[in-house]
Amino acid sequence: MAGAIIENMSTKKLVIVGVILLLFQAFSFMVGGLIAPSPTTAVHYLATKCVDQVKHHQSTKWFMPWGPNQCKKIRDFDEATDKKIEANNIVFAVHIPLPNKEMSPWFQFMLVILQFDIAFKMYNQIEDGALATIDVGLAYRDDTLSEWTEMAHSVEQRKLSCNFTTTKTYENEGRYYECDLLPFMELGNVAHKYYLLNIRLPVKERKKINMGIGEIKDIRLVGIHQNGGFTKVWFAMKTFLTPSILIIMVWYWRRITLMTRPPVLLEKVIFALGLCMTFINIPVEWFSVGFNWTWMLLFGDIRQGIFYAMLLSFWIIFCGEHLMDQMERNHFSVYWKQVGPIVFGSFCLFIFDMCERGVQLKNPFYSIWASDVGTELAMAFIIVAGICACLYFLFLCFMVFQVFRNISGKRSSLPAMSKARRLHYEGLIFRFKFLMLVTLTCAAMTVIFFIISQVNEGHWHWGDYTVQVNSAFFTGIYGMWNLYVFAIMFLYAPSHKRYGDEQSSGDAGASGEDIQLTTTITHVDGPTEIYKMTGKEAQE
């Protein structure tokens, strides 16, 4: 039986392949650490207070904080009071980016966070559960001379979460509350050079709108976007890795189809893993630089979710196929208890993503974090997802331990063999165990990356707790996935060599010893000798 490359390749060549893969892994970390800048940049903005002098507000009128057509401004609300300017006639204007700068499609997305500067007043304190009603409009243009074009308009509510750290007395009037950051806006792409936000805080005493929210002094925004330099490095990695995985996948499946037997479940799952890796690699993001595709963030999340589901399912099946007896293995249905929760969890991730980013395709100011129920659900989802990821890793460790124990039980047949045969199978067992340990390492890094990504995505909503993710971590983990999939398809491809071709014909008696370990090989089909060895019990 020819077996797989992992069994028939010489140790010297296998070490060379391992060293090359390790060098590529180190290079993928170095690309992020030495070449790429940090993944994101945060820019702080202070809203300019403009005065709308028209009694009936015009929705088509846009207020510029600076430039040739800048609005009539006031310094603070005391000046507005002196000039008898009502709160409803004050517009907070923010131009993105700062003067003499431009936005770029290479920024990929834009997340905007809002913070109120609220002064303490004894007669105007922040009430418990206070809601700020925000009438906000977003416009864009691509040069400094053209008119602004409306992109979105919405009336949103944000719950204020503020603390006053000192005693509430008249002596402390004018001190500022400490308020949490509030989710404000998210754009799935940055297709235009200039953006303008006009924010109103309408006051309607009869309807209790914007009553009991304290004395707002200023509005501050934090604009977060992906760094253009990191985007170019990320696109370059995808462009390089896509053909690499595609070529090895085609080569692997060609070797599978050349065999006389039909492919087993493990070989099919390895091929499916290669397909999913190719799907997430295809650099369709290049089109986002030239086209206004607002759905790219959502599409990227869907692609990553499919890959997560396939990778986690593969590890379960990979271990399970070395535990099942010959009657149970090679049937996908026996894994429904393990794969079912993975598919269900991935579906929940998709629904959660659609509830926020799906809605943001129409209304970029929508946020699931804006309400108490949404915040609790989102927080619970992140915590549960992290716990489930840890439980999955522990379960995978348990399965690997069972595989090792199963193989150790089969080693009782080795002493009865000739020395050459015994050394051969001991070498196969060592290679397989090493691959399983590499798999566990890859799984551990994937789980850590998943948890940190979930926390990092919502870290603006966690108050004081933030997580900074380095570029090297992104490029390193992404490179690790590709190298792992490449290695699995290469090592588990059928080999053109046969063990014993180079041995003398006088060693023919070894075939009987071979059968002692792998049972009747003619009836046990599989990619490797270890695969056949671990499934012999049902045949016996």
Image (spheres, helix red, strand yellow):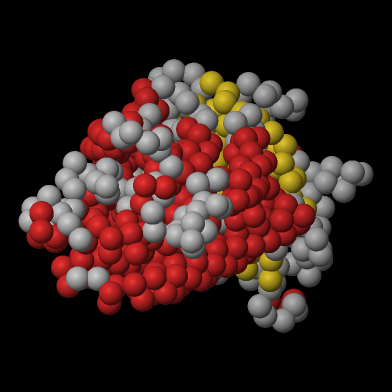
Image quarter for residue 52? top right
Q: Residue 381, image x and y in percent?
A: 65, 57
Residue appearing at x 39%, y 43% in the figure? 267
Question: Which residue is most to the bottom?
Answer: 167
Q: Residue 387, image x and y in percent?
A: 60, 66
Residue appearing at x 17%, y 45% in the figure? 497
| Left or right: residue 434 compared with residue 402 | left
In the foreground, 213 or 361: 361
In the foreground, 496 or 460: 496
Q: What is the total number of numbered labels drawn onto the structure image?
A: 0
Q: Residue 454, image x and y in percent?
A: 53, 56
User: On screen, 55 above or below 400?
Assistant: above
In the foreground, 243 or 70: 243
Image quarter for residue 203? top right
| Left or right: residue 39 compared with residue 391 | left
Q: Is residue 377 visible?
A: yes
In the foreground, 342 or 479: 342
Residue appearing at x 31%, y 35% in the figure? 259
| Left or right: residue 1 compared with residue 60 | left
Image quarter for residue 503? bottom left
Q: Is residue 323 visible?
A: no
Residue appearing at x 77%, y 55% in the figure? 373
Question: Which residue is most to the top?
Answer: 146
User: On screen, 495 above or below 312?
Assistant: above
Question: Which residue is most to the right?
Answer: 206
User: On screen, 385 above or below 75?
Assistant: below
Q: Residue 516, image x and y in percent?
A: 34, 64
